[in-house]
Image: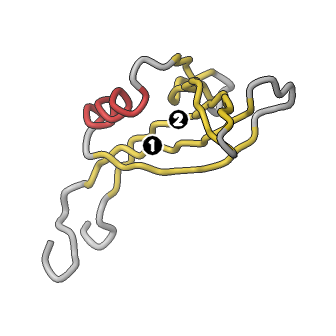
């Protein structure tokens, strides 16, 4: 980088969009969203390593999104697990779902042709 201008090489990286949902055990209502987070990684391998460290062997199901032609395309995972919280010394169980969409970002400096 020279004077804040990046060279003509492409800058590729992985972005992970995480939508976190929770509901209290015994609650028959829907999950509620409590947080959104974005993570960036230089490579997909770094992303996979982070997912393993963050979620371990939690239950994973594939997450899909329809493309322009209406075909289902894999875009990430929904990871489910139990969590616990304490309130006034009482332990409460929560069920969590984290919707994790993984995207490869490709950028190019628009000033260089």
Nearer to the camera, 108 or 25 = 25
Q: Residue at x 29, y 31 (%)?
A: 49
Q: Which numbered disc, 2 or 1, marks the residue that appears first in the sequence?
A: 1
Residue 85 location (% of width, % of height): 62, 38
Residue drawn at x 68%, y 32% as measured from the top left: 92
| 100 on left or right of 72 | left
Mark pair 2, 1: CA separation: 7 Å
Name the quarter where the C terminus is drawn: bottom left
Quadrant in which the N terminus is drawn: bottom left
Q: Residue 33 versus residue 6: which sits nearer the camera? A: 33
Task: Give the structural element (helix, strand or loop) at label 1.
Answer: strand
Question: Given the current orientation, which residue lies at the most extreme front position?
Answer: 89
> In the shown orientation, is residue 90 left or right of residue 75?
right
Q: Callout 1: few (<14), some (14-19), or many (20+) C-alpha neighbours within 10 Å?
A: some
| Disc number placed over residue 16 in the picture, else none | 1
Picture quarter containing residue 65?
A: top right
Q: Residues within 10 Å of mark 2 (few under 14, many from 20)?
A: many
Counting from the top left corner in percent of width and height, residue 36 is at: 58, 50
Q: Nearer the viewer, residue 108 or 113?
A: 108
Whether residue 28 is situated above or below residue 11 in the rendered picture: above
| Residue pictured at 22% horizontal, 79% vertical | 4
Which colour style is shown?
A: secondary structure
Circle 2 SS class: strand
Residue 62, percent across and down? 55, 19
Residue 99 shows which numbered tag?
none
Q: Is residue 110 above or below residue 35?
A: below
- Give the percent coordinates (x, y) of residue 54: 39, 33
Find residue 87 and report its image quarter.
top right
Q: Which residue is mark 2?
A: 100
- For the residues labelled 2 and 1, say whether their Cβ atoms are less than 8 Å apart: yes
95 vs 51, left or right, is: right
């Amino acid at each position: 980088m020279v004077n804040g201008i990046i060279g003509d090489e492409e800058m590729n990286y992985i972005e992970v969009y995480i939508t976190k949902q929770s509901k209290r055990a015994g609650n028959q209502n829907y999950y509620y969203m409590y947080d959104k987070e974005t993570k960036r990684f230089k490579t997909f391998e770094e992303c996979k390593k982070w997912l393993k460290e963050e979620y371990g062997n939690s239950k994973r199901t594939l997450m899909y999104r329809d493309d322009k032609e209406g075909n289902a395309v894999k875009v990430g995972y929904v990871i489910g697990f139990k969590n616990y919280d304490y309130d006034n010394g009482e332990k409460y169980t929560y069920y969590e779902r984290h919707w994790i969409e993984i995207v490869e970002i490709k950028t190019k400096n628009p000033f260089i042709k």
